[in-house]
Image (cartoon, grey):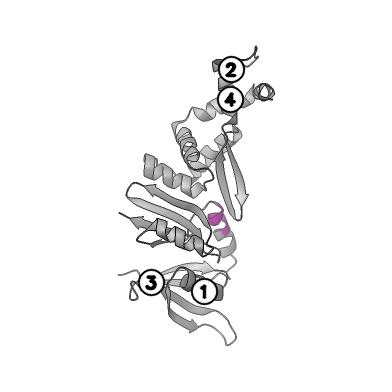
Amino acid sequence: MRININSVFVDSQVKALDFYTNVLGFVKKHDVPLGEPGDENRWLTVVSPENPEGAELLLEPAGHPAVGPYREALVSDGIPATQFAVDDVRAEYERLQGLGVRFTQGPLEMGPVTTAVLDDTCGNLIQIIQEG
Amino acid sequence: MIRKQGLAYSGGMADEMFKALADPTRRKILDELTERSGQTLFEICARLVNKHGISMSRQAISQHLAVLEDAGLVESRREGRQKFHTMNPAPLRHITERWIEPTEQESSP
């Protein structure tokens, strides 16, 4: 068994695709229309260009009524929805801040790892982590 | 001004402060908030577990924060959709004024 999908609920798939590709730097992998014609929901995934055959991130519509309160509570306490690995947290922090990304936690060294937490503008917090 | 604050801080509030300071985890929380002001619950928990090996539930840490807030030692503010915590050292002046640099007679309990 392998992990092939990780998902985040996004307010808007259009906005999310822009942020996750143009700002974070992932690339689109799958984009399949779902439901009835006219339904805007898509099966939309992105992957890392460093590992295009690796796990996909599903940008899932946040339409279900339970999603709102669930995400609100997590975001309020600063809890990330998921985590991405980077080579250099400080460099990514500088780069993303330059692109207008807001961080709820700046780079924090904790023994062997350094982390930071950013707002994905689609309703989630994302932790980036550098190991070693 | 400082004198007035000292008086206002006598009594129940001082009890709350000493109670809050009596717990080692709560003192670590104050240490971490001193190092960086403005942290989410998530960051505080991450610091406690990674730097101090204190692995408590977020709920337990949240309760510690509530005790610190009741004592006036921690303040929280909403910014955007997040709640950020900061340390407020002002109540600690009570200790200085009472024992280290007493100005006049105080009627502290």
Q: Earlier in the sequence, mark 3 or mark 1?
A: 1
Between the residue at mark 2 and the residue at mark 4, the CA separation in whole angstroms equals 8 Å
**Which range is magenta?**
A72-76
Identify which residue is drawn at 41% across, 56% down: A90
- Residue position for label 4: B93
Amino acid marked by disc 3: Ser
Question: Which residue: 57% across, 16% down?
Answer: B101
User: Marks 4 and 1: same chain?
Assistant: no
Query: In the rendered structure, the residue with mark 2 lies on which chain?
Result: B
In the depicted structure, whether residue A10 falls above or below residue B92: below
Mark 1 → mark 2, Cα distance in angstroms: 59 Å
Where's the N terminus of chain A, which quadrant?
bottom left
The circle on residue B98 is: 2
Which residue is disc 1 drawn over? A18
Kind of residue sitting beneath label 2 = Arg
Tell if the residue under mark 2 belongs to the same chain as the one under mark 4: yes
Q: Is residue A89 left or right of residue B20?
A: left
Q: Main secondary structure of the magenta part?
A: helix
Q: Quadrant of residue A115?
A: bottom left
> Is the residue under label 4 in contact with that under label 3 (CB below 8 Å)?
no
User: What residue is pinned by disc 3?
Assistant: A48
